[in-house]
Each structure stands twice: as C-alpha cells, then as structure tokens.
Amino acid sequence: MSRIKVELHENQVIALKDICKSFENNPHELINVLHKTQEMFGYLPAEIQEIIAIEMNVSVAKVYGVVTFYSFFTMVPRGEHPISICMGTACYVRGADNVLDEFKKELKVEVGETTSDGKFSLNCLRCVGACGLAPVVLVGDKTYGRVSPEGVKEILAEYLS
C-alpha cells in the first residue's frame, strides 16, 4: 500500500507549532503534543510527525515509535464513526472474532481501514473494561454489549439513517 502525501496549509503548520509551543517544546511532553495534535487533525500522518519532531527537537523515528506503539494514535484518517471491537479475553471467548468478521463483511474493509465513503473505520482493542457485557463493540463513544454477529447490521443501521 503506497503512502499518500499530505499537503499542510500554512495555517495548519502554524497551529501545529502552537500546540508544540503550548507544551514549551519539551520532548517529555511528546505524548501530550501528539494527543492534542490528533484531536485537531484527526490523525497523525508522516508530514505532521516531521514537524513535531523538528519543533520538539526529537528524531522523527522517536515520534513515529510513539505513534505506532500506542493504539490510540492513528496515521490514517478515521471514519466519521470509528468502530472498535474488544478482543480482550472475555470478549474473545464469547465470540468477538465472529462479530469482527461480520463487521468486515458488512463494511467491506479490513481492520485498520476506513470505508470508501469515510463513514466507518474498523479497529480492535485489547480490553474496554466491560467484561460482563462481552463481546463489546464501541462506535465512537457509545458502547454496545453482548453483541452477536446478527446484531451487526442493526448497529450499523443506527449510523446510516
């Protein structure tokens, strides 16, 4: 898969530099800068990571390492409705893999991808702390418990109308 080059406008670069300055360009604040930046831009493409590295006086490899280590960060745009399937032990044992397969089939995307219309993106999590509701699906901030493969169409229908 080839990487798409992202063109940043001057005002976006200024906003990005302002975020770094708000944390005094302190390399120990890198995670906070990345959080704030992802809040603003929605994701962290290579071009943004490069500017952060320069402003924070750290290597691009360090920024990339942090972005790829923490599952909260993403280098690709998320869908309008990000879907996360819990794959923790309780959820997995209760069929989360089948729920995930159904979402992949319905959305025609793989984990880590966004639908072509930009409506949905699909990801997995390790644990959301709602084991009693396993298997659990998050759509944005909304939690769905005891989800079965048959319930996937119903969940998606809420966001398609």
Image (tube, grey):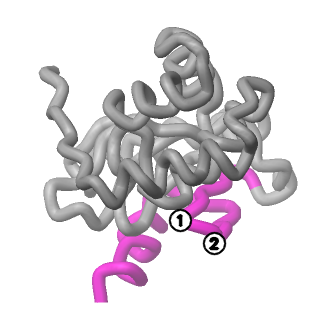
Please give the range of residues in magenta: 134-161
- Relative height, residue 5 to residue 146 (above, below): above
Q: Is residue 65 above or below residue 19?
A: above
Instruction: Point out residue 11 in the picture as x, y percentages from the top left corner.
Output: 33, 60
Relative side of 46 to 25, left or right: left
Tally the marks.
2
Tell me which amino acid carries mark 1.
Answer: Val
The residue tagged 2 is: 142
Q: Quadrant of the C terminus?
A: bottom left
> Dot 1: within a 10 Å radius of its alpha carbon, few (fewer than 14), some, or many (20 or more) residues?
some
**Circle on res. 158:** none
Q: Would residue 119 be found to the left or right of residue 94 on screen?
A: left
Q: Which of the pair 35/82 is nearer the observer?
A: 35
Label 1 sits on residue: 139
Amino acid on which disc 2 is placed: Lys
Residue 103 in view (yes/no): no
In the rendered image, is residue 15 in sight? Answer: yes
Q: Quadrant of the N terminus?
A: top left
Q: Position of residue 67 (x, y in %)?
A: 55, 27
Q: Quadrant of residue 34?
A: top right
Residue at the (46%, 73%) spot, across then down: 155
Q: Residue 51 at what x, y percent from top left?
A: 43, 32
* Left or right of residue 81, residue 9 in this image: left
